[in-house]
Amino acid sequence: MKEYRTEAIRNIALISHSSAGKTMLTEAALHVTGATTRLGRIEDGTTTSDFEDEEIRRGISLSTSLVPVEYKDHKINFLDTPGYLDFIGEVISALRVADGAIELVDSVAGVEVGTEITWQQSEKFGLPRFLVINKMDRENANFQKTLAAVQEFSSTRLIPIQLPWGEKASFQGVIDLLSMKAYKGDGKTVVDIPAAFVDDAETARTALIEAAAEGEDSLLEKYLETGELSSEEIQRGLKAVVRNGSYVPVLVAAGSSEIGLIPILDAIISLMPSPAEITPVKGMVKDAEVEVKCTDSGSLAAYVWKTTADPFVGKLTYFRVYSGTVTSDSRVWNQNKGVEERFGQVAFIRGKETIPTKLVHAGDLGIVPKLAETSTGNTLCEKTHPMILPEPSYPGALFRVAISPKTQADSTKISPTLTRLCEEDRTLSWYNEAATTQTILQGMGDQHIDVALRRAETKFQVNLIAGEPRIPYRESITRKGQAMYRHKKQTGGAGQFGEVHLRVEPLAEGDFEFVNDVFGGSVSNSYMPAIEKGIRATMGEGIMAGYPVNALRVSVFDGKEHPVDSKPIAFEIAGREAFKLAFMDAGPVLNEPIMRVEITVPEANMGDVLGDMNTRRARVQGMNTEHGRSVINAHVPLAEMLRYTTQLRSMTGGRGVFSMEFDHYETVPPHIAAEITAKHQKEKKEE
């Protein structure tokens, strides 16, 4: 691969709903530019982008692939992102390092849920965008209908810079409104616009010139005076309105048939910004914010946007250079971890093919293998010029499963494997739930978790099983209670004796308080630690339903001891049993975690979602409407939200999204608590 300087680089994220044609568009771009000798097919598992076994098996992209395309002395780094909603974290990571985005829309399906979500994400990043209406050769393809559907959804104005040359089976090329020429097939053959399309092209070009005139005041003045702009002026004005986000140019293509590829590549080079032309990113130096200008002469600032485990090479780190240059066999400073990393051979990557290089210029995307400490989101810089580049915000996890090892050998590797998986994917997280003694893995949906577990198996050789997570209930009391217990054991020789009288009462703040209120020495102080130990052990195991006990005060106020037979173990047992009796005398209850939930759905689904919330014991805290979407805020028990991701998508056709975080604990209704307790008692008997 040739060496490309900053001005000749374009970093473009391809985003869309699943199956809109991103992977085939990159495949076709590689083929028409001569990088590959044949066109790969998703059905055959031969595409450059989808090279992982799991992607080939499922026939969809599961992670972002980097595919550089060389064209007209420029390098276009395509970031082919997944379209399935569970993998939105991959889309966010790609948009973080892109300088422009291309939203693909299927000419038959039109605006789908993935279109809406990826469009909104690209708006958050403020990226210049193209809209490509793809698959124009499909039966029932309709350019105008699809364009109208996207315009209805989008708050940004759309401006066609191309028209389709025919539709459905007769789609044979594109009509370019900038050059007013027709590009046949892949775009290498240029002819005059067929007579049947001239009028439509003239009308669309007028609208295009009006949009371009808004790019500069001088252009607008000239257009108002003369009613015309030169081709160079149209190009200049259009470039300005694309970059400031006033307009989104509309192009057409049929990626799998290789129609319209060259005009798309030309438009990327002429209208999308190079890394040198974007607004400088902001970095943090100590507590001060500084602008990071994309130039080779600056001090090094590189952002790690992706890490992945390769079974043959080991850990691969994907980075974007925002300032300075990166060379092989150099040392860099990881400011987030506070460690120095040694770079080996840096390279470019095309799918799974690595292309070694000596130098990565500012603005380019590269990879390096086998970094020890660096993970996704870290900033690499010079130790003498430390800096941290901002990380994007990722959505919180919505779907939880309990993870267990398949074999004893897997159990020792479970923690490091889950940590590595979560380092690679920022929308995955895991923790150990003390209340249920389960390992919990959290992700965006069932497919997301399933793919993570398969990666654990193929990349780390660790077999994990996913199950239903138990709810981390807590046991507590509602009033004062007291009890006594005498432990007496006489089996010949030295016996065991201990008697404990204690009270329990609810504790307003804190989890547990132990008080020695014995007067007169009926129980020696030396036995108090043993009594407390017995109580704490019982609290951990639970009394009603096997869940931890909390929020109570225990006061030992009397007891008896024997001069010979009393020993710590006797008082530990007596304390434990007295505590159980006192607990059951004090109005025991189960408490459950209540989550603060925010649900955003189309207005049309509002009634269904509210009705469903009522069946989940939800308490709605508020509702409002913004941009045609309803937002519901509610407090909902965690027990009712375990599989809500799947159910909400089903109710709203995938258009509903929600966020959820812990808020507080509340008492479980008696009839539900009785079911939980009965289930626990049954499990104990079966043991």
Image (cartoon, rainbow, N blue to C red):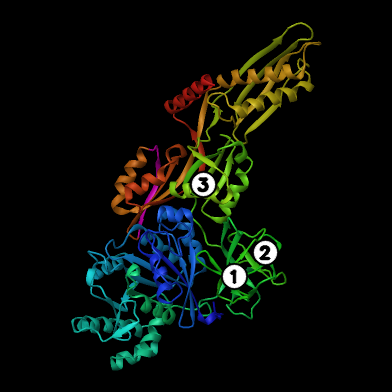
Q: Position of residue 209 (x, y in %)?
A: 31, 85
For the magenta stretch, what is the residue range?
Answer: 616-626
183 left or right of 417 in image? left
Does residue 529 lie above or below 257 as drawn? above
Quadrant location of the N terminus in the rendered image: bottom right
Q: Position of residue 387 (x, y in %)?
A: 65, 68
N-terminal label among 2 and 3: 2
Q: Nearer the viewer, residue 299 or 43?
A: 43
Quadrant location of the C terminus in the rendered image: top right
Q: Residue furthest front?
A: 37
Q: Nearer the viewer, residue 78 or 430?
A: 78
Q: Position of residue 475 (x, y in %)?
A: 55, 29
Rounded to the nearest angstrom, the CA distance separating label 2 from label 3 is 29 Å
- Residue of label 3: 453
Q: Nearer the viewer, mark 2 or mark 1?
A: 1
Give the label on residue 334, or none. Answer: 2
Badge 3 amino acid: Leu
Rounded to the nearest angstrom, the CA distance separating label 3 from label 1 is 29 Å
Res. 387 visible in picture: no
Residue 626 quadrant: bottom left
Give the label on residue 347, or none. Answer: 1
Near mark 1 (Cα within 10 A), the count class, few <14, some 14-19 or many ≥20, is: many
Q: Residue at x 59, y 57 (%)?
A: 312
Res. 274 visible in picture: yes
Q: Residue at x 46, y 64 (%)?
A: 49
N-terminal label among 2 and 1: 2
386 left or right of 177 in image? right
